[in-house]
Amino acid sequence: MAQRRDGVRWGRWILVAVVLAVINVPYLLHEWEVHRAATDGIPVTATVVGVGQAGDDAIVAFRLPSSVDSDRVERRVKVTGSVGVQAARTKQLEVRVLKDHPSVFHVDGEVRSNAALYIVVFADLFVVGLLLLAWRLGGRIRRPTLVGIAVEDIRSGQEGSLLDKQDDGTYLVNGEVARTGPASLVLSLRDRDIEIHLRDHDNPIGVGERATVRVQLVG
């Protein structure tokens, strides 16, 4: 049971890692490709097909040469006002294009939006917030206390929590001794307590130590 719980915890961490990868990797790959286009891209002269205003900036619609974009798809880029004025006047725009990836390009004077970065950061913070919430609630919310009758003497236990049903219907319990009495003790597991009545069995384990015992659950 302890091994299974460890496996569940590892599974949760792996799931979190996968979720964070799904959120961050595409954005990081895109940013890396844009950087490559700006530094190692093929310089070409694109044909401007339209220029529109966007506040102090401009939106330039252009088509790349067929040598780098056989489909000659119309693309758009937001640039500073001065670059937009020049593009409207010359009907040309200098562009650096990533080889074999015409959708990845860089234009001097380009005004890039941070919207994608904000979305990624928000998603990361949301995942981290859920993790912190789960961690805090995991330590505060406990399931109802179980009651059991010992069918053997209490023995020294191991690290971790265990509540494992045996073939004969009894349960093997392992946890920390929360309190003891003349004829009972309470074992604290990760998410619940188990009150164990000793009957005629011995308990040599003190409060704060780990203990294990087989019990018959009665409630």
Image (cartoon, helix red, strand yellow):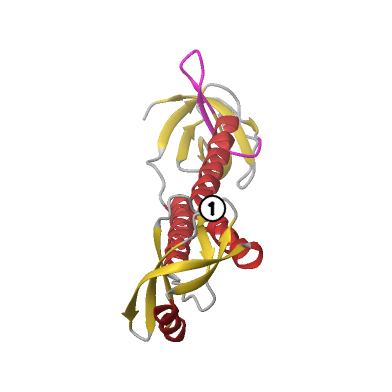
Quadrant of image for the C terminus: top left
Mark 1 residue crowding within 10 angstroms, few (<14) / some (14–19) / many (20+): few
Q: What amino acid is labelled 1 in the image?
A: His
Q: Secondary structure at mark 1?
A: strand
Residue at the spot 53% in from the left edge and 36% down from the top edge? 8
The rendered magenta stretch, by its main secondary structure, is classed as: loop
Q: Which residue is mark 1?
A: 101
Residue at the spot 44% in from the left edge and 64% down from the top edge? 116
The residue lying toward the viewer, choosing from 43 and 129, is 43
The residue lying toward the viewer, choosing from 216 and 105, is 105
The residue lying toward the viewer, choosing from 120 and 178, is 120
Above/below status of 68 relative to 194: below
> Which span of residues is magenta-colored?
158-172
Q: Quadrant of residue 88?
A: bottom left
Above/below status of 73 relative to 211: below
Residue at the spot 41% in from the left edge and 33% down from the top edge? 147
- Is 124 magenta? The answer is no
The residue lying toward the viewer, choosing from 84 and 218, is 84
- Is 171 magenta? The answer is yes
Q: Position of residue 33 (x, y in %)?
A: 58, 58
Residue at the spot 53% in from the left edge and 21% down from the top edge? 151
